[in-house]
Image: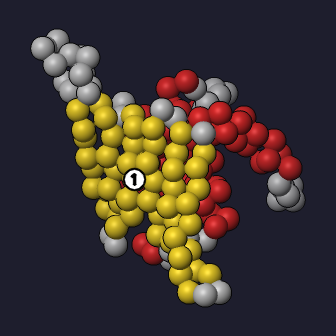
Amino acid sequence: MRIYEGSPRTDWEEVLRSVGAFADHELLKELIFLELEAGFVLQGLAQPNVGQWSESSGMLAKKTFELVDDQIGQLIDESIARRKAATEAGQPHVEIGNYYEQALRVIGAWVDGQHPRDVFFFEQDGSFVLRLLIGTQGGIAHQLAEFTRDEIVAMIDAAPQQRSDAPQPPAR
């Protein structure tokens, strides 16, 4: 990730998880995500004027956000603090209302394993299509990947087991 190269605290899993939490908070769906030099563009469909009745009630409108480096850092900090508070209160963090946080977290973990130079994806009905710019022996090339909604749900369900299989730090 260009904007986080050399940073010890961030990776795609945490960045996308935090962006997903932001998308959940904004009640977005049908996401488009594009990496920029200084951040990201996130676009999704949302109901305009949620909470107010109007002729456009029930219709969806595009909402576009440019999330720059500092905003991403703030989203990460808020997401970590929210999860820590939930853990300390003994509350599970996985809820029906945080689908994008969970979906983008598992996608981010997969992306981390690919080591891309650039990331673009879009989502439709819970399925994601990703285009990654990857360094190869022959230079750089785009790689496409697709995850169906069922695959994303299975990845979310498998994540706790994968964490429990990971080496744990020694107790102090």
Q: Amino acid at mark 1?
A: Phe
Q: Quadrant of residue 91?
A: top right
* 81, 158: nearer the viewer: 158
Q: Colour scheme of this structure image? A: secondary structure
Q: Quadrant of residue 167?
A: bottom right
Q: Which residue is mark 1?
A: 33
Residue appearing at x 67%, y 65% in the figure: 113
Q: Is residue 40 above or below residue 122?
A: below
Residue with the most extreme bottom position: 138
Residue appearing at x 24%, y 38% in the figure: 62
Q: Is residue 170 above or below residue 146?
A: below
Left or right: where does residue 66 sit relative to residue 148?
left
* SS state under label 1: strand
Residue appearing at x 34%, y 50% in the figure: 42
**Placement of the C terminus among the 4 image quadrants:** bottom right
Label 1 crowding class (10 Å Cα cut-off): few <14, some 14-19, many 20+? many
* 146, 76: nearer the viewer: 146
* 168, 51: nearer the viewer: 51
Residue with the most extreme left position: 55
